[in-house]
Amino acid sequence: MRGSRSALASVMATAFRGLRSRLLLTSGSVFLVAIAVAAAVVGPMYQSASAESFLVTKLRAEPNFVTGLTFVYAREMPLTGERWDEQALGA
């Protein structure tokens, strides 16, 4: 009787140690998958942001006639009286 109890306790202890080991391995695998997914998401975002930053830096460093960038600024005169009414009515 006593021998069967100790054998049962030994089997149960071994089973619990196995379950604990399996739990730790599963937790570690899930953690590694989470890191891999995060890297897969953040990597391309970082790449595009750094490429845009590099492009902006290079464009700002070059003169406008080299880059082909032009700026057109047309100041509109303030509308008064009759012209204001025409534009407000859509004429």
Image (cartoon, rainbow, N blue to C red):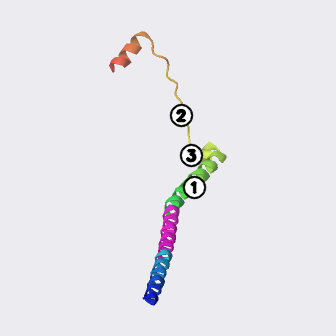
Position of residue 47 relative to residue 9, above or below, is above
Q: Name the main secondary structure of what is drawn in magenta.
A: helix
- Please provide the residue range marked out in magenta: 22-39
Q: Amino acid at mark 1?
A: Ala
x and y, in percent, of residue 53 in the image: 59, 51
**Which of 74 and 43 lies nearest the eye of the viewer?**
43
Mark 1 is surrounded, within 10 Å at the Cα level, by few (under 14), some (14 to 19) or many (20 or more) other residues, namely: few
The answer to whether 38 appears left or right of 84 in the picture is: right
Mark 3 touches mark 1? (CB < 8 Å) = no
Give the CA distance from mark 3 to mark 1.
19 Å
| Mark with earlier residue (2, 1) | 1
Task: Give the residue pinned by disc 3.
Answer: 68
Q: Amino acid at mark 3?
A: Gly
Q: Amino acid at mark 2?
A: Val
x and y, in percent, of residue 66 in the image: 61, 47
Q: Helix or strand or loop: what does disc 2 sit on?
A: loop
